[in-house]
Image (tube, rainbow, N blue to C red):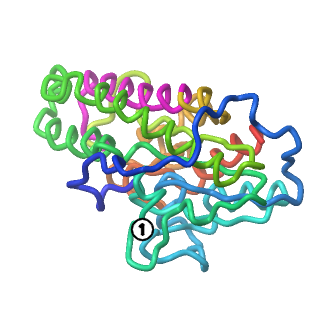
Amino acid sequence: MNFVKHTGMSLAVTGLVLATAGICSASIPASAAPGGGTYVALGDSYTSGPLIAPASPTASALCAQSAANYPHLTAAALGLSLTDVSCAGATVSDMTQSQYPGVPPQFDALSSSDSVVTIGIGGNDDNTFITAVAGCSLIDITDPENIGAPCEAAFGGTFASNIASDAVNIGTALRQVHALAPAARVYVVGYPDILPLHGNCWPQMPLTTGDVAYLNGVEKDLNAMLEQQAEANGATFVDTYDPSIGHDACQSESVRWVEPVIPSTDAISVHPNAAGEAAMARAVEAAI
């Protein structure tokens, strides 16, 4: 996800065209195996790993891609030949259209010879994460007394409704992946835990306790939708949320896997740091 680009984006996937439909879990090829295969990584900034050193020498600087993100770590661990086209700020629409000048649609990287595809997407659609985190922080920064849930009062069920409406676009994208890479096993990578399960850590993450609980619910809704669409469209969901509980942005620098609003390691605000990307890699490797 990206908290700079897409501040005014809308759900721009109406023109996504499917070449095929009706993929079911039975269509996952049993012959796809990790060792020595080809791996294509698709996704947004939770995949690309902005500011985590070293930078990827093969990706556009606009995509803020790290050579130590989970696709690179997974490929090295499993002996896969990697094509990583993840890009900070990507939405589902950027799978089929150019996100930046000179940056091809991410689906252009797919081919019939691919054996593994991961996709980490959905948080930028409908401005879900930038509104939920940045928007709620702007509301709650004026509430240091930790009173109530002002952001929940402002947004109510908006996030849940938007996430539910995005499900069709995620499903469409997954079926397109199968059409373009029919021999590949497809893995949908979820989002790690950002906030503590209880309490808050204002101003490190300037949210009231009530709104921490509210935004935890938003992230769980997003991951649940991604898991449902993976299961419905012949893909495997990779849970990175449960393994990351206790490593949220409110924890100490040595413990956390996601940086707070003001980061202190080589990562951008409210994104996985190097330890977080390594943890996500372990989850992906275990799934593969």
Q: Report the label total.
A: 1
The question of residue 225 being in magenta is answered with yes
Q: Which residue occupies the foreground of this view, 10 or 273?
A: 10
Q: Which residue occupies the foreground of this view, 96 or 146?
A: 96
Is residue 87 visible to the viewer in this orientation of the structure? yes
Position of 212 relative to 103 (above/below): above
User: In the image, residue 116 lies at what x, y percent?
Assistant: 74, 51
Local SS, label 1: loop
Is residue 266 visible to the viewer in this orientation of the structure? no
Residue at image coords 75%, 34%: 27
Looking at the image, the residue that sits furthest to the front is 19
User: In the image, residue 34 lies at what x, y percent?
Assistant: 84, 50
The question of residue 106 being in magenta is answered with no
Along the horizontal axis of the image, is 11 left or right of 255? left
Along the horizontal axis of the image, is 248 left or right of 77? left
Q: Which residue lies under the disc numbered 1? A: 98
Position of 23 relative to 61 (above/below): above
User: In the image, residue 14 lies at what x, y percent?
Assistant: 34, 47
Residue at image coords 24%, 46%: 134
Query: Which secondary structure type mostly characterizes the magenta part of the structure?
Result: helix
Place residue 29 in its image quadrant. Answer: top right
Amino acid marked by disc 1: Ser
Residue at image coords 14%, 27%: 150
Q: Which residue occupies the foreground of this view, 188 or 249?
A: 188
Q: Which residues are magenta?
A: 204-228
Mark 1: few/some/many CA within 10 Å (<14, 14-19, 20+): some
Residue at image coords 41%, 25%: 221
Along the horizontal axis of the image, is 156 left or right of 2? left
